[in-house]
Image (spheres, rainbow, N blue to C red):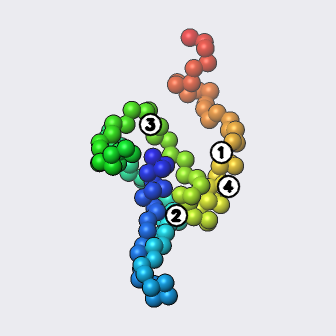
């Protein structure tokens, strides 16, 4: 999933260069500047690729298990968002006391 998202944020732009006298290819990347409230992901069972030996377009079945947890790190995030994510990740290891009441009926104390 990470690879597909990164590939979707990269692209090439062709422009006519008067200095070079030919078309120039520029690599365009669009890192995330803010995270959406919801992220819709479409999982596919088959992918389309090119066979290395014949060069034909073939359909390939995805056989390996896919994990749905998204870790937005690295090249996906812009510099401002990456700093905020690093702070949030540092605060992730904080331990909290359990929040429950003694007279809570769902709180099981072991005495039945």
Residue 6 spot, x, y in % from top left: 48, 56
Separation of residues labelled 4 and 2 (CA atoms): 19 Å
Specify which label sits upstream in the sequence, 1 or 3.
Answer: 3
Separation of residues labelled 1 and 3 (CA atoms): 24 Å
Say if 23 sits above or below 58 in the image: below
Residue in view at x 43 percent, y 51 percent: 4
The residue pinned by badge 3 equals: 66
| Marking on residue 87 | 4
Specify which label sits upstream in the sequence, 4 or 2.
Answer: 2
Specify which label sits upstream in the sequence, 1 or 4.
Answer: 4
Q: Could you tell me which secondary element the residue under label 4 belongs to?
A: helix
Residue in view at x 44 percent, y 36 percent: 66
- The label nearer to you, 1 versus 2, is 2
Specify which label sits upstream in the sequence, 2 or 3.
Answer: 2
Asked if the residue under mark 3 is in contact with the one under mark 1, i.e. CB atoms within 8 Å, the reply is: no
The residue pinned by badge 2 equals: 31
Q: Could you tell me which secondary element the residue under label 1 belongs to?
A: loop
| Marking on residue 92 | 1
């Amino acid at each position: 999933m990470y690879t597909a998202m990164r590939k979707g944020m990269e692209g090439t732009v062709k422009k006519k260069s008067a200095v070079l006298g030919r078309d120039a290819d520029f690599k365009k990347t669009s890192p995330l500047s803010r995270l959406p409230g919801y992220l819709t992901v479409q999982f596919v069972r088959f992918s389309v690729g090119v066979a290395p030996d014949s060069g034909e377009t073939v359909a390939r079945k995805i056989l390996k298990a896919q994990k749905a947890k998204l870790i937005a790190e690295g090249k996906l995030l812009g510099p401002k968002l990456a700093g905020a994510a690093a702070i949030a990740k540092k605060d992730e290891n904080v331990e909290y006391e359990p929040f429950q009441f003694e007279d809570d009926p769902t709180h099981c104390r072991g005495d039945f």
